[in-house]
Each structure stands twice: as structure tokens, then as C-alpha cells.
Amino acid sequence: SSPELIEAIARAMHVRPRLVYLPDIALSAMAQFPGIGARIARLTQSLRVKDDFLAEVLQFKPQFSVDEEIRQMVQSWQQ
């Protein structure tokens, strides 16, 4: 999910993530305002990637965990 990705990047950077959690009812109320409903929906939906099917078809198993890859990415970015 998007929050899990942000938390993993924050862990790799040794910082605390700045996530704001809002109840669904608050987001639903904000989505009712004219002109911003579609934007609210797009920004608040969590990004999820399921790779089970692709991994099975290609018989692919990554060498490193997501956390390890993110750690390496952060190290490269910080250089």
C-alpha cells in the first residue's frame, strides 16, 4: 500500500514518516465539494501492486526484499 511504501522509505532514511490519517467519513465529505471530488478520490486511494500472477508465470523470485531495494535506492539518492 502507499503508506507501507512511504514507511519503508522513511525507515531506510532513518526518519519518521509524516503521514496524516483521516477517517473515511472525512474523505467522503471532502469529496462532495464541487470541483475537487475526483482529485480527492485519486489522491486518497492506496496504491497496491499484486505481483503473484506475474511471479508465477515468469517464475521470478527477486534476489532482495523490497526493504533492501528501497535501502539501496535511498543510499544511491543520498550520494
Image (cartoon, grey):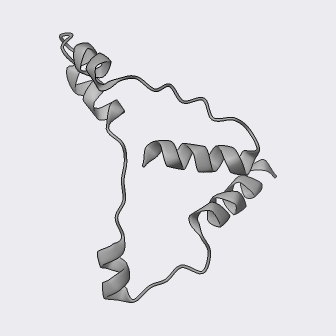
State whether residue 12 is above or below residue 57.
Answer: above
Which residue extends farthest top? 33
x and y percentages locating residue 41 in the rendered image: 26, 30
Give the image quarter of residue 35.
top left
Which residue extends farthest bottom? 59
| Residue depicted at x 70% and y 58% | 71
Give the image quarter of residue 52.
bottom left
x and y percentages locating residue 1 in the rendered image: 42, 49
| Residue depicted at x 33% and y 84% | 56
State whether residue 43 is above or below residue 29.
Answer: below
x and y percentages locating residue 74 in the rendered image: 71, 53
x and y percentages locating residue 66 in the rendered image: 57, 64
Front-lying residue, 52 or 36: 52
In the image, is 13 to the left or to the right of 55? Answer: right
State whether residue 67 is above or below residue 35.
Answer: below
- In the rendered image, is residue 36 in sight? no
- In the rendered image, is residue 5 in sight? yes
Q: How many marks?
A: 0
In the image, is 73 to the left or to the right of 58? Answer: right
| Residue depicted at x 40% and y 23% | 22
| Residue depicted at x 35% and y 23% | 23
Front-lying residue, 76 or 65: 65
